[in-house]
Image (cartoon, rainbow, N blue to C red):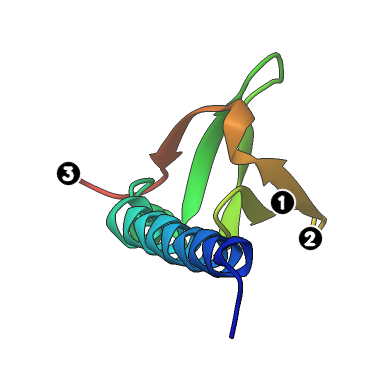
Amino acid sequence: MPTRKAKNNINIEANKAIETTQEHETKQEKAEKYGKADFSEEYNGKLAKILVLNQPMIIGKIIETRPYWLKVELPDNKTIYINKAYIISIEPVGVKP
């Protein structure tokens, strides 16, 4: 028969497991809710002017987007990666409103 101390330890471990599960669900819900808040699907695959902090204007085709990065093909066929944290604006080129 388990001692009182052993029973308390089991209850503490069970409570920790429940809290961890609840915390994980909350993070997953946030990811689903805010995951596409950057409109990546609107400019992916398009030619765009990209203004990056402390850099000259970049013109290129956005060929792939990730949660924190853009993959951009420049007119000279170079590929660069831009961290979204440093992007000030993205303007599609040749698209009429």
Q: Which mark is residue 77?
A: 2
Which numbered circle lies on residue 97?
3
Question: Is 77 or 68 nearer to us in this picture?
Answer: 68
Would you say 16 lies left or right of 83 here? left
Q: Which residue is mark 1?
A: 74
* Whether residue 42 is visible: yes
Residue 4, image x, y percentages: 55, 64
Q: Residue at x 33, y 47 (%)?
A: 37
Distance CA(mark 1)–CA(mark 2)? 5 Å
Image point 62% across, 68% down: which residue?
A: 6
Disc 3 marks which amino acid?
Pro
Give the alpha-carbon distance from disc 2 to disc 3, as whole Å: 28 Å
Q: In this view of the protein, which residue sits in the foreground, 91 or 71? A: 71
Residue pictured at 62% horizontal, 52% vertical: 70
- Does 37 sit left or right of 14 as displayed? left
User: Residue 91 sits in which quadrant?
Assistant: top left
Quarter holding the C terminus is top left
Q: Is residue 18 left or right of residue 34?
A: right
Q: Residue furthest top?
A: 54
